[in-house]
Image (spheres, rainbow, N blue to C red):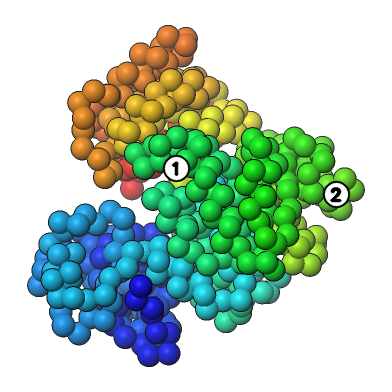
């Protein structure tokens, strides 16, 4: 395996440089003195930012982009082996590695590398930890899978030993990381286009835990079914947290919500109350995310005053119950939820938000996930008062022709909830303008481009 030489700054080419993670690491390595260039299919806010800091970005991926001065090619999982650029790099004999391997090699340069994993909540928890570290003046390097206002983007380059990043299980990419601290937020069925079943996913998390050194730390959600099977693979320390189990190392008591659905709670450390935390984000799921961040922070001897300050300052990242605006008295929120558990958590949180009727405009993400969780999607979405479904966002997949958003619509109707399906965003927008009334809450939801519906309604 090719090893990046962090002393000798070569030329690294990023295939898919506009991705949220790839763009961040491209900028990080650029600031460390490497020559960085790359390509993507189209211009975006992220690619324009990269160009503003001196990184050359080529639009469209063709073999002519691969030049003899490139020392290493880094590519995303979305790049197929028959991609013209990919083939050109192979034929030229240029060393190549995927994004996860590159991230793992970067992590080796930090004495404290914190990897935040789980089926849900990675971006939010990474952001919470980041806010606490910033409040504690620990000067972390941060890579987050969303735009975080506190760092004006998805990347912060610090000068300390602290590195904070998300760790995704898809394609076992996090098994190429080199963490000293792992957070495991939850383990559920997902990415079944890669994993065989839940047992296969759990096995991946066991291997992830195996990566920790003897002086490492695992923080794991005690509400994960038989979490001990996972934690037994940790050679270092283990801390547990739970919203429901007071026997875990960290737990929440006296949970309450304000008029906007923001949670507050007493923190129990080994059964004893050590402080009261008030959040600026909604939902019970974020209380769990906060507990994991608190467990990590307390292990590192950060005071509760600083922890409270950092968590209170966190008001969410882009596309996580993000307030977009108001039109004709209708509040528009956007959320990235694309798994049934995430959808249910977001819609439960919405119940505590001031509104008359909750409209959920949901865009399923990938045919594989839609087919695997068809009934679960219907059950989760039925927590809304009214549901509007967009066509499935294909992402990396080809339409198999045997699954449609209309299938979810029929199941939602069977559960007694109003549901509608339209082929185009334009039809959805027209329907919403006719049917939403003052005081309603409209949530656009999904990991695709459904956010465009709310933005179009707001005239953005």
Which quadrant of the view contains residue 261? top right
Q: Nearer the viewer, residue 214 or 125?
A: 214
444 shown above or below 388: below
Secondary structure beneath label 1: loop
Residue lying at 64% horizontally and 35% vertically, measured from the top left: 225
Graded by Cα atoms within 10 Å as few (under 14), some (14 to 19) or many (20 or more), the crowding at tag 1 reads many
Q: Position of residue 197 (x, y in %)?
A: 45, 35
User: Which residue matches tag 2?
Assistant: 270
Question: Where does the N terminus fall, quadrant-wise?
Answer: bottom left
Is 352 left, or right, of 274 in this rendering?
A: left
For the point 23% across and 27% down, which residue is it? 423
Locate residue 96, reporting x and y percent: 28, 70
Q: Mark 1 points at which residue?
A: 336
* Image point (43%, 75%), residue name: 28
Residue that appears at 44% across and 38% down: 190
Task: Give the mark nearest the N terminus, 2 or 1.
Answer: 2
User: Which one is in front, 271 or 135?
Assistant: 271
């Amino acid at each position: 395996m090719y090893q990046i030489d962090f002393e000798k700054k070569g030329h690294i080419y990023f295939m898919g440089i506009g991705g949220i993670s790839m763009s961040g690491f491209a900028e990080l390595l650029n600031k460390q003195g490497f020559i960085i260039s790359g390509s993507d299919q189209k211009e975006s806010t992220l690619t324009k930012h990269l160009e503003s800091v001196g990184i050359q970005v080529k639009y469209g991926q063709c073999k002519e982009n691969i030049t003899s001065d490139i020392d290493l090619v880094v590519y995303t999982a979305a790049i197929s082996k028959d991609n013209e650029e990919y083939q050109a790099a192979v034929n030229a004999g240029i060393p190549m590695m995927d994004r996860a391997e590159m991230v793992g090699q970067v992590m080796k340069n930090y004495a404290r590398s914190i990897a935040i994993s789980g089926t849900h909540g990675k971006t939010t928890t990474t952001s919470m930890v980041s806010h606490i570290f910033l409040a504690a003046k620990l000067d972390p390097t941060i890579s987050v899978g969303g735009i975080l206002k506190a760092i004006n983007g998805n990347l912060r380059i610090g000068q300390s030993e602290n590195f904070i990043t998300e760790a995704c299980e898809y394609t076992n990419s996090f098994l190429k990381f080199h963490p000293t601290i792992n957070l495991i937020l939850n383990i559920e069925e997902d990415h079944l286009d890669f994993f065989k079943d839940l047992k296969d996913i759990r096995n991946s998390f066991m291997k992830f835990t195996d990566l920790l050194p003897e002086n490492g730390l695992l923080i794991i959600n005690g509400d994960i079914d038989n979490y001990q099977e996972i934690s037994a693979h940790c050679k270092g320390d283990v801390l547990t947290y739970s919203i429901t189990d007071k026997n875990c190392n960290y737990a929440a008591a006296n949970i309450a919500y304000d008029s906007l659905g923001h949670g507050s709670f007493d923190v129990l450390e080994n059964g004893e109350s050590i402080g009261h935390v008030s959040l600026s984000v909604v939902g019970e799921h974020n209380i769990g995310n906060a507990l994991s961040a608190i467990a990590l922070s307390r292990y590192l001897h950060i005071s509760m005053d600083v922890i409270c300050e950092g968590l209170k300052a966190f008001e969410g990242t882009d596309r996580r119950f993000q307030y977009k605006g108001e039109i004709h008295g209708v509040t528009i929120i956007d959320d990235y939820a694309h798994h049934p558990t995430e959808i249910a958590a977001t819609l439960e949180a919405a119940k505590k938000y001031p509104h008359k009727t909750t409209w959920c405009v949901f865009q399923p993400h990938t045919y594989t996930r839609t087919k695997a969780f068809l009934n679960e999607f219907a059950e989760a979405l039925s927590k809304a008062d009214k549901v509007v479904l967009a066509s499935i966002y294909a992402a990396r997949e080809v339409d198999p022709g045997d699954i449609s958003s209309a299938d979810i619509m029929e199941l939602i109707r069977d559960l007694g909830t109003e549901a509608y399906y339209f082929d185009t965003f334009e039809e959805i927008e027209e329907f919403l303008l006719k049917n939403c009334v003052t005081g309603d809450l409209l949530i656009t939801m999904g990991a695709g481009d459904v956010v465009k519906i709310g933005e179009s309604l707001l005239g953005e």
